[in-house]
Image: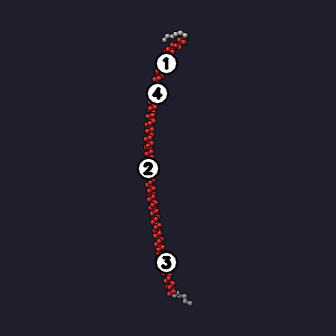
Amino acid sequence: MDITPNPLVIGLQVAPFLVTIVGLYTIIFKPMLQHLEGREDAIEGAKGRAQELQDQLAARTAEYEEKLNAARAEMAELRSSRRATALSEADTMVKGARAEADAEIDTAVKAIQQEAQAAREGLQASSAVLAQHIASQVLGRPVAS
């Protein structure tokens, strides 16, 4: 029994194996590896682009927030100035109305004082006559002043 391998049989068995390996490499493995590398590059590129877009989005969001805060501050300032203007106008109107009311009150007080003075004078004039008349009635005789 001979257990040494025959080089011709080994060569005949290795040759189809090598041809199959080379064929598989050129037909299947090489294009598949190129496709997987391209896919990996595309994924990495897409991740990079997504990160760039997120950075741009964060920058724009910060810019919009800044503009929004500036607009809010401007509106608060405008509202404050308008309110101050309205309050000053209202104060002016109240002062004017108060001045008119005070003038009317002063006129009414003067008129009442004049009427009271006229009534006093009328009562003083008629008080002497009335006193004589009452004294005449009480005493039962005419009283001269």
* Mark 1 lies on residue: 123
Q: CA distance from mark 2 to mark 1?
A: 76 Å
Q: Amino acid at mark 2?
A: Ala
Q: Quadrant of the N terminus?
A: bottom right
Give the mark nearest the N terminus, 4 or 2.
2
Residue at left 47%, top 69%? 39
Q: Amino acid at mark 1?
A: Leu
| Residue topped by disc 2 | 71
Q: Camera-side residue: 6 or 90? A: 90
Residue 46 in the image, given as x and y percentages of width and height:
46, 65
The colour mode here is secondary structure
**Residue at left offset 46%, top offset 62%:** 50
> For numbered disc 3, what is the local secondary structure?
helix
> Residue at 49% of width from left, 83% of height from top?
15
Residue 24 disc label:
3
Mark identifier at residue 110 = none
Q: CA distance from mark 4 to mark 1?
A: 22 Å
Q: Is residue 128 above or below residue 94?
A: above
- Where residue 137 sits: x, y (%)? 54, 12
Q: Are marks 3 and 2 in contact (CB under 8 Å)?
A: no
Spot occupied by residue 45 in the image (x, y as percentages of width and height) = 45, 66
**How many numbered dots are placed on residues in this image?**
4
Q: Residues within 10 Å of mark 4 (few under 14, many from 20)?
A: few
**Mark pair 3, 1: CA separation:** 141 Å
Q: Are marks 4 and 1 in contact (CB under 8 Å)?
A: no
Comes first in the chain, label 4 or label 1: 4
Q: Label 2's element?
A: helix
Residue 108's tag is 4
The Cα–Cα distance between marks 4 and 2, rounded to whole angstroms, is 54 Å
Q: Amino acid at mark 3?
A: Leu
Cα separation between marks 3 and 4? 120 Å
Q: Earlier in the sequence, mark 3 or mark 1?
A: 3
